[in-house]
Image: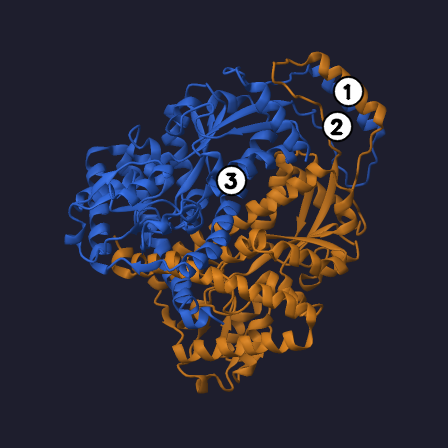
Chain colours: A blue, B orange
Amino acid sequence: MRRRKLIKKAALGAVGSATAGSVVQTQTANQTADRTANQTADQTTSPNSTAKIAATQPAIEWRMATSWPEGQGITFRSAVDFCDRVAAMTDGQFIITPYASGAIAPALEVFEAVRSGEVECGHTSSLYYIDKNPALVFGTTVPFGLTPYQQYAWFYYGGGEAAMTKLHDPFDVVVFPAGSAGIQMGSWTNKEVETVADLAGLKMRITGFGAKVMQRLGVETVALAGDQIYAALEAGTVDAAEWQSPQTDEQLKLYEVAQYCYYPGWWEPGSTYKLVINQAQWQQLPKAYQSILRSAAAAANLTTLADFDAASGEALQRLVDRGVKLKPYSIEIMEAAQRTTFELLEESARTDPTFKALYDQWRQFRRQIFQWNQINELSFEQFSLQSQSASL
Amino acid sequence: MRRRKLIKKAALGAVGSATAGSVVQTQTANQTADRTANQTADQTTSPNSTAKIAATQPAIEWRMATSWPEGQGITFRSAVDFCDRVAAMTDGQFIITPYASGAIAPALEVFEAVRSGEVECGHTSSLYYIDKNPALVFGTTVPFGLTPYQQYAWFYYGGGEAAMTKLHDPFDVVVFPAGSAGIQMGSWTNKEVETVADLAGLKMRITGFGAKVMQRLGVETVALAGDQIYAALEAGTVDAAEWQSPQTDEQLKLYEVAQYCYYPGWWEPGSTYKLVINQAQWQQLPKAYQSILRSAAAAANLTTLADFDAASGEALQRLVDRGVKLKPYSIEIMEAAQRTTFELLEESARTDPTFKALYDQWRQFRRQIFQWNQINELSFEQFSLQSQSASL
């Protein structure tokens, strides 16, 4: 509750103060020593006590630029939840105020605002910045790549964290995965698409690496912001459009202007959001606050995905009730798209040694975890998620 | 590093001191006020500063009883990681020392030790305590129930947390999910099992709800600790045995005494570990520490699963290289096992209103999320995890 009040105050206070930085409260060694002495005298001890008194942690305020419009639901909520978690864990000492896209940095310039030190941290997607370094794609999602849980296994225990740290070091930022949208919904359209030939000349709203794959398959890709998609589908200036998940697609009312939804969203099987922190700011943090940011980001990885999955289950039911026709992509299209994806990855690997090192490591990890998940996850879900079992 | 030293010291100190409790350092309102005044004078301010100084958080020491032998790898490591995270986030102020099973409470009596206040908290599986209340099964894993990620969607956003809180309240404990083993491996055997008739009279090591299902299918179930399984399979006193995951099954060297491994482990599709906290101890914690425990548990949910998945990918490869034959359960067996599972759930629901309320809510959630994951997760994995795609 108090947290909400603090955010409001901070947000109001920051208006017109574009360079408001962090407030780090310093204290002398003497002050700390005095306090420690006082408290030791006062404390209960036990035979196995190893109690020691930490210095009071400093009060810090950071601003967080995000790539998300405030009304977009789960993605912005993920950033808010992260900030709330940090405030709660520090008893209101470390306050991070999240700002919607455009408020303190444009949606696609969050990375740059953090890198330059204009803001202390951001919540965004690395996919927006693959022009800075194509290997950033491994930190977000690769078409036909890792699912969210595989992505996390790679990050925490499969070499991903070290690879990502090395990749971001030259940009003077520290990054952590901080939320996933899961395997995406698919593509809305009124045009049935069954073969690769049907893709030729199709005008489709799609961005990132997925757009590159579609282009090779003959699609004319268009980059549109979320709030422009409805009008474009309605006017027929695009034939097809992908956005995110049943719940967010429903918010845009895409079901009113497109009757089919093709699945799965093979272009983004594990879209991972990123907490990006300016490196100088990170280094000034007490170790305990660094640990709190790490754990809050790990918790966000789980709870954002849980939020998407729970909301999607409900929203999909409503979409089906409204008459949306769900159609699977044909094997022909899936195979062509996968082949094209790996051609593109191989091309980057041939010309870029940094990309190649990451790609080789990632591909080896992918092969092993696919074999394992084929045995446990796929075989289980093939049986239990089928309509008859699912209706129990 | 310092953390490791603290654990060692605490563990040694606790020998012979079975009732060593928590050490809560108290401080007077005056002390806090003094400190606040000092620090405010010293701190840098800015126009939007809402800086306030929190009271120094108390030094606390807790003991954590676990159900895991120290050598078991990932499961005990999950408990250690959780405690390390809490220590790091509190700058060494809140120290929780994890003990292997048997050290301060027997493996299957962790819940009772926490409930009675003998230890402050525990890391265990609710499945061990379904005799106290059969509905506890929903908090761990139900055969043919939710996968780990579905389980978390249910807990955080599908009503699970409220249901679990209500269920545990009468036991004077607070619980949070704190790690998952994922969808389990399957069953080791030398006897080919293709039909339900083949199950009749089979002697199998299996525990929990899965054992009840197997019994109805004619299996003679045996409860054995992990370190007894190898000898039992070797001597033929059991025909089959399930344990956990490729990596932990490999540690037990089960591949030396059984040539087949049947998959998937449909009896435990999302085995979730639990952080159990004595309610009186929980209520004494400062709010910030409660938030830190919550976030550390959420982080553990993710990283433990990531640990299992990464390790399983590597271990499965080694098992296959050693000549283990992986065999899928037949549809006949899967269908009979699923039917039996839901018969057992319905029976409990008919006689137990608490169980029925939870079951109805859980089943409705399961139906919705299964429909969604059928569209996105299953359709994607059916294509991308198949051997040809997986080998890219």
* 3 vs 1, front mark: 3
Task: Tell me the chain of label 3.
Answer: A
Circles 2 and 1: CB distance less than 8 Å?
A: yes
Residue drawn at the location 33% of the way across and 38% of the way down: A137
Task: Tell me the chain of label 2.
Answer: B
Residue drawn at the location 53% of the way across and 15% of the way down: A17
Q: Residues within 10 Å of mark 1 (few under 14, many from 20)?
A: some
The answer to whether tags 3 and 1 share a subunit is no
From what the image shows, is residue B302 above or below residue B28? Answer: below
* 3 vs 2, front mark: 3
Residue B386 visible in this rendered orientation of the protein: yes
Check disc 1 and report its element: helix, strand or loop: helix
Q: Mark 2 points at which residue?
A: B55
Q: Measured from the top left, where is residue A176 in percent x and y?
A: 46, 35
Amino acid of disc 1 = Arg
Q: Residues within 10 Å of mark 2 (few under 14, many from 20)?
A: some
Residue drawn at the location 65% of the way across and 77% of the way down: B350
| Tag shown at residue A78 | 3
Amino acid of disc 3 = Ser
Quadrant occupied by the N terminus of chain A = top right
Q: Distance between the residues labelled 3 and 1?
A: 35 Å
Q: How far apart are marks 2 and 1 (CA)?
A: 8 Å
Q: Measured from the top left, where is residue A75 in percent x and y?
A: 47, 40
Looking at the image, residue B122 sits to the left or right of residue A37; the answer is left
